Amino acid sequence: MKNTVHFILQGKGGIGKTLVSTLLAQWIKTTYPEAPLRCYDTDQENTTFSRYKAMQVKHVPVMNDSRTIDPKRFDALIIDILAADGNCVIDNGANTFSPLMAYLLENAAFDLFKESGRNVIIHTIVGGGDTLHDTAVGFTTTATSTKVPLVLWENEHFGVLQTPSGKLFIDSQTYSDHAHKVKGRVRLALRNSDTFGADIKKMNTSRMTLDEVIQSERFNIMEKQRIKTVYKSIYSQLDEVQW
């Protein structure tokens, strides 16, 4: 993998965009250590990704003094991405989803990336339970707006991805209509909240990477084992994506 640009896009807040960003960035760094990795955080309200010191995430301020988003400030993001070779991961907040998508489309940014030798991948998250409807709409919006290949992250933290009638999201017409654009799926499996859930929360709250957790005395051997199990599952799925 070289010169890839990964946008994490989903209009619903609190669905796991930063978690996906951190997992993806760590996988890229581990799997392709020879290629430079640059990470960006465009979220203007919850700059969580930029708090991961180990990943040296650059925050991109796109709000002006009036606390409104200035689309032209996205120029700095695009210019920075194109300034050097390497892989890039961009975490985008719910508050900047629509403005950033509009900017990318209006300015033909996807075409510019392609002309510059960059491969763009959009990572979109669909959640289960009460989040399914809204996130499925976000998936559809993203899929119909561009010709960019997608990676679908299925977040089971809120429940299994199925309708009240019991139909799984991947069996729905909504997914079927755009399945040809999906180059891979990554399942964020629902695990025991008292063990796996608590450990992942502890890691995320501390803004730590897997390498930092393994080296830290704040996590006992079983906490480390469970976290490594989660990462092994995610990494193996990312290995199967048709990049």
Image (spheres, helix red, strand yellow):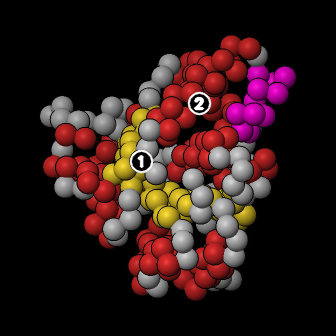
Please say if 45 is above or below 102. Answer: above
User: Whole-percent x and y of residue 12?
Assistant: 43, 56
Q: Is residue 103 at least partly visible in the picture?
A: no
Magenta stretch encompasses residue 213: yes
The region drawn magenta spans 208-219
Q: Earlier in the sequence, mark 2 or mark 1?
A: 2
Foreground tag (2 vs 1): 1
The residue under the point 28% across, 66% down is: 144
Judged left or right of residue 100, residue 198 is right
User: Whole-percent x and y of residue 131?
Assistant: 36, 45
Q: Is residue 221 at least partly visible in the picture?
A: yes
As shown in the figure, which amino acid type bears the numbered disc 1?
Answer: Gln
The residue under the point 47% across, 47% down is: 15
Judged left or right of residue 7, residue 209 is right
The residue under the point 71% across, 38% down is: 209
User: Whole-percent x and y of residue 57?
Assistant: 72, 58
Q: Which residue is mark 2?
A: 231
* Picture disc at residue 242: 1
